[in-house]
Amino acid sequence: MKKSFLIIAFFALFAHSIFAQSAGYSNASVSIKFFDRTMYYPGSADDNPIFVHVTIKNKGPETLRFKLADDRMFSVDFTAFTVKNTRLEHTDALTRKRTTNQTVYFREISLETGEEYSFVENAKNFLKFDEPSVYYIELSFYPELYKSKYKELKSNRLTLEVRPTPSAASSSFIPISAGTAEILQPEQISPDKVVEQTIVARQKSLWDQYFLYIDLEEMLKSDPLRRNKYSASSAEDGEKMINDFKAALMSDTIEKDIVAIPERFEIKRTDYSQTEGTVTVYEWFKYKNFYEKKEYIYHVRQRDGIWRIYGYSVNNLGTE
């Protein structure tokens, strides 16, 4: 009887110790959202990353202190389940790192009341997304690093759709440089240059170059009806919608302002932060006896160093 009491007392003391150590993080919250969301496919972390924006916030009255590893595989972890509740495996690289003896370098972060700390991680560095499916993904944050896993903060849950990889045969858009067999690749150029090259490509009717810096998916979703239909579609139907949308742009049956061909244009202003921006352009359209002048405001977004146009607005400035 005395031995049983000692065992019970030990577990009670151990549980109390864990609670006391975790209590210091009771006012901390961890939230996640997709960073610059796009279409996700199976494949490598470099070719088609799944970037997730992580935010740690101090919601309490006292200073919040935690450790953050330089290699964040020792500070955070991702968990993902399929709709059938099958849990995804960790990547081999993550497993190797966590099972190899090594020095983990970290820094201590302090947040005052209401302050936040954010960073972006690629979920594909943590999990194997080998099959197209709908996944439910969440993040665990370890304020005392991964070795102290009993100190864990859970994030909210996101719904992630990984679509089938489009085949070359099913793709109607493989941008080819005019006069050569070279496949075009977007370059890391400034937002104003992105808009300038897009307009010039339209003036020259070079559709492959025109679409090089346009986010067709986001442009399609700018219309509420198209957005709702696209969100409810399967991966294959969604891909077909994007191809049909591109074909409609080329035939000048929808979104006529964005495919209109100006006689001349002038970039007036460019404003952008690290990931978002606008480019204001005056464009002149020639008619028989006059020019119609319009102000275009192109909305651009940056991902992996590449700026793309995802929206626009038009204001009429009269005639000349």
Image (cartoon, helix red, strand yellow):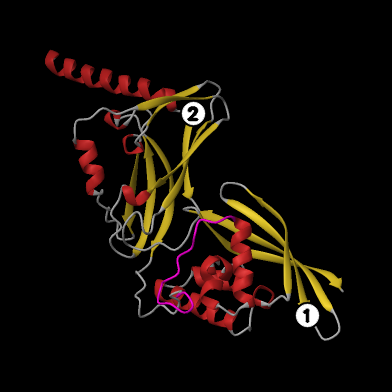
Say if residue 223 shows up in the picture.
no
Q: How many marks?
A: 2
Magenta stretch prevailing secondary structure? loop
Quarter of the rendering containing residue 48: bottom left
> Who comes first in sequence, dot 2 or dot 1?
2
Q: Is residue 94 above or below residue 173?
A: above
Q: Circle 2 sits on which residue?
A: 27
Residue at the location (45% across, 65% down)?
A: 185
Residue at the spot 28% in from the left edge and 60% down from the top edge: 130
**Amino acid on which the number 1 mark rests in the picture:** Lys
Crowd around label 2: few <14 · some 14–19 · many ≥20 (10 Å): some
Depth order, front residue of 189/132: 189
Residue at image position (82%, 77%) is 291
The residue nearer to you, when weighing 107 against 63, is 107
Please report the residue visible at 54 percent of the width from the left and 82 percent of the height from the top. Answer: 247
Q: Which residues are magenta?
A: 176-190
Q: Position of residue 89 (x, y in %)?
A: 24, 51
Mark linked to residue 286: 1
